[in-house]
Image: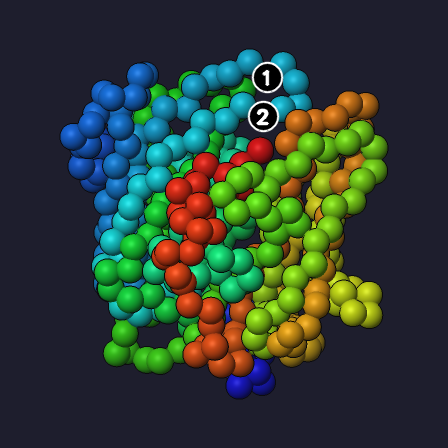
Amino acid sequence: MRRLVSLLLVFAASRAAAQAGERACPAGAALRASVPESADAGSMPGMDMSASTVQVDSARREIRIVAGPFRIAATAHESDDMMMMDTPVLRVAWPASGWVRGYSVQLCDGDAASGAALARGMVHHVGLANYSRRELLYPMVERLMAVGKETPRVSLPGGVGVPLARGDTLGLYSAFHDVGGRTVERAYVIVTLPWIPAGHSHPIDVMPFFVDVNSVIGGTSAWDLPPGRSEKRSEFTMPLGGSILALGGHVHDYARSVRLEDAENGKVLVRLDTKLASDGHLISLGERVFGFHEEGLPLLPNHRYRVIAQYDNPTGHVIRQGGMASLAGAFVPDDVRQWPLLDPLNADVKRDIASVGAHDMVQ
């Protein structure tokens, strides 16, 4: 199976390179008409209460979640601490059984006469939680996807996908901040998920893989970032075996790298480096797709691993909750039947569900 996956990844890479860019944002009027007005509109000062809608495009084999409106207010940036607006978590009923094979996120202007995309830098994060399945490493609901300003479009090959069933409950959460002191009165998020309908084929099951340097269930995983060079690390034990096909991550400004090591022998398995502006602010974080010159990265059951983040804070002072680092990717379990079950009565799971969105990738 791993040989097949490797070949699929090579094919996917060449195909992805030829793909055109994202679809243009719809016109503001179309955006406003596509999302039903919430009965609670006006209950949040300064903005309409946001809502969401799900669009199934069978011809393109895409499912789109459109959410809004969100008001992104201009703020005074007086320090390195980022001012953000967190949005409510919007519950979404997944409309069709099948497999998701990627995702992309757009932020669009709901007041534009014609389609207009907003600056990608306004997005701190957009994520989808799956309340119907557990994370592999933590007693939490699954984070199906998580996108920051540094996250590129994710596209899996056609022969693999993340299984979802009709009626699964997802939660869409997001956080924004202004760029250049501009207030946006009506911003809309469009999450596009290419999918494979059930019955058309049976792709290889791929599951989301997530590990955090500072995982705190029900709380923020950010930490106070000291001045100068620093390192944060944590260890985990794999409950089952499998292979990682692709790996990306999320970090904050001044991060240098995040890497995965074998904790039992110290071997570096993968290292993702950042691209930073001259002032240390984040431009992008590297990603790794396995299968070009090697098999998928194997992770062994009952084996200890560690994830390590490196930062270099040049400001000369502590940045409150300025550090954050996680790795996320596509994982093929050796036996998906061994996947840990979600226990909704578990205290950690309850705490996590109550905090979805409030602490996901939050500074």
Q: Nearer the viewer, residue 56 or 331?
A: 331
- In the depicted structure, whether residue 20 falls above or below residue 119: below
Q: Nearer the viewer, residue 203 or 304?
A: 304
Q: Nearer the viewer, residue 299 or 147?
A: 299
Q: Is residue 305 visible?
A: yes
Residue at (52, 47) in percent of width and height: 217
Q: Which of marks 1 and 2 is nearer the N terminus?
A: 1
- In the depicted structure, whether residue 110 falls above or below residue 357: above
Q: In which quarter of the image is residue 211?
A: bottom right
**Residue type (three-letter) at the residue carrying disc 1:** His
Callout 1: helix, strand or loop?
loop
Q: In this view, does 185 lie to the left or right of 207?
A: left
Percent of width and height locating residue 261:
75, 63
How many callouts does the rendering have?
Answer: 2
Percent of width and height locating residue 17:
54, 61
Q: In which quarter of the image is residue 79?
A: top right
Percent of width and height locating residue 30:
22, 36
Q: Give the quadrant of the C terminus.
A: top right
Residue highlighted by disc 2: 82
Residue highlighted by disc 1: 77
Q: Can residue 24 be seen in this view?
A: no
- Is there a contact, CB below 8 Å, between mark 1 and mark 2? yes
Q: Is residue 147 left or right of residue 92?
A: right
